[in-house]
Image (cartoon, grey):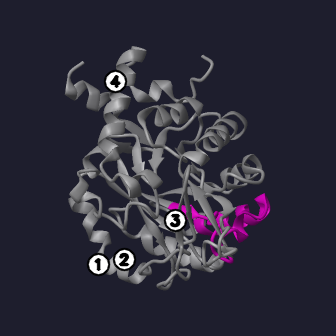
Amino acid sequence: MCHNAHVSALRTSLAGIDLHSPLIGAAGTAGYTTELSDAGALRSLGAVTSKSLTLHPREGNELPRVIPLRAGMLNAIGLANMGIDQFIAERAGDASAMPCRLFASVAGHCVDDFVQVAARLDRETEVPLIELNVSCPNTVDGRTFTADPSALNEMVSQVRAVVTRAKLFAKLPPDGDTVALAGGAVEAGVDGLTLCNTLPAMAIDVVSRRYKLANRRGGLSGPALHAVAVRVVHDVRCQVTQGRLPIIGLGGVVAWDDAAELILAGADAVGLGTILLADPSAPRRIRQGLESWLTSQGVESIASLVGQVGS
């Protein structure tokens, strides 16, 4: 199989959005738009998801707010970002010159925050997909909207009413009843799901007897989360979407076989997060591994392997 054939085999569609690669830079790990350009990563990614954007700028949590762990990372960034006004004025225009798509992540204190930010982004024609970050574990109110399926349903319904152009995805947590939450989001009209966010966790310095994070608790990401993400993607596809809506699977992907595992579990595209902070050049390596995997499996399209575990 020649290189061009490899490239076409990796092409996929996410809720009608054509991507030349199933790999996506996850929110909060790929900057706002083009930050990964120097590492050459953008050409191996189908899309980059912006840092989560809020109605007003946020400084985030106190330092320290990122801690390396043996099997990943613990972070409590606190959704630090420039705010939607500055993003649209200074960064949204980058999308037209990017070799991949630009998706946008939205966060907020209340339902109206999400509605206002999403409505602004819906007017940005270079942003084809809006991802609702309703599952951040390191802010006071970041999990309010995934407390139960009805709360999530109400919030997504209000955002759906103002998002008429862009595709709308909800990013859900790995803990709790993710299947029920996914059902609530789907009922409210999302076009797809992102599974899953980081896992609430904590680290303690045994010498000083102090919390390692200033915020005390944060989100666990990296390899420690991977097997959980595989289970979440599998369960939601089998019990909720059944292939009718696309899933972006992410959690602890550091090599091509991690991505392949999520695809077989039911992910139509695969998010790369913590690995981008450790190795910004990883997308090329992972993409090449997926190309070889397709050849070994004797298939011509990555889409034909989605959800094919046990087949």
Q: Tag 1, which secondary structure?
A: helix
Which residue corresponds to the image point at 45% horizontal and 75% vertical from the top-left?
120
Disc 3 versus disc 1: distance between alpha carbons?
22 Å
Residue contact between numbered discs 3 and 4, judged by CB atoms under 8 Å: no
Which residue corresponds to the image point at 60% horizontal and 47% vertical from the top-left?
224
The 10 Å Cα crowd at callout 1, few under 14, some 14 to 19, many 20 or more, is few
- Residue type, label 1: Glu
Q: Tag 3, which secondary structure?
A: loop
Residue contact between numbered discs 2 and 1, judged by CB atoms under 8 Å: yes
Q: Quadrant of the C terminus?
A: top right
Mark 3 vs 4, N-terminal side: 3
Residue contact between numbered discs 2 and 3, judged by CB atoms under 8 Å: no
Asked if 180 appears above or below 291 in the picture, the reply is below
Percent coordinates x, y for residue 86 in the rendering: 36, 82
Percent coordinates x, y for residue 117 in the rendering: 50, 75
Q: Tag 2, which secondary structure?
A: helix
Q: Tag 4, which secondary structure?
A: helix
- Using the rendered view, name the quadrant where residue 69 is placed: bottom right
Percent coordinates x, y for residue 30 in the rendering: 38, 60
From the image, state whether disc 2 or disc 3 is nearer to you: 2
Mark 4 vs 1, N-terminal side: 1
Magenta segment: 131-159
Disc 3 versus disc 4: distance between alpha carbons?
38 Å
Q: Which residue is mark 4?
A: 292
Give the number of the disc on residue 163.
3
Please, which residue is most extreme toward the top here? Answer: 298
Question: In the picture provided, is 191 more to the left or to the right than 173?
Answer: left
- Residue type, label 2: Phe
Q: Which residue is mark 2?
A: 87
Q: Which residue is mark 1?
A: 90
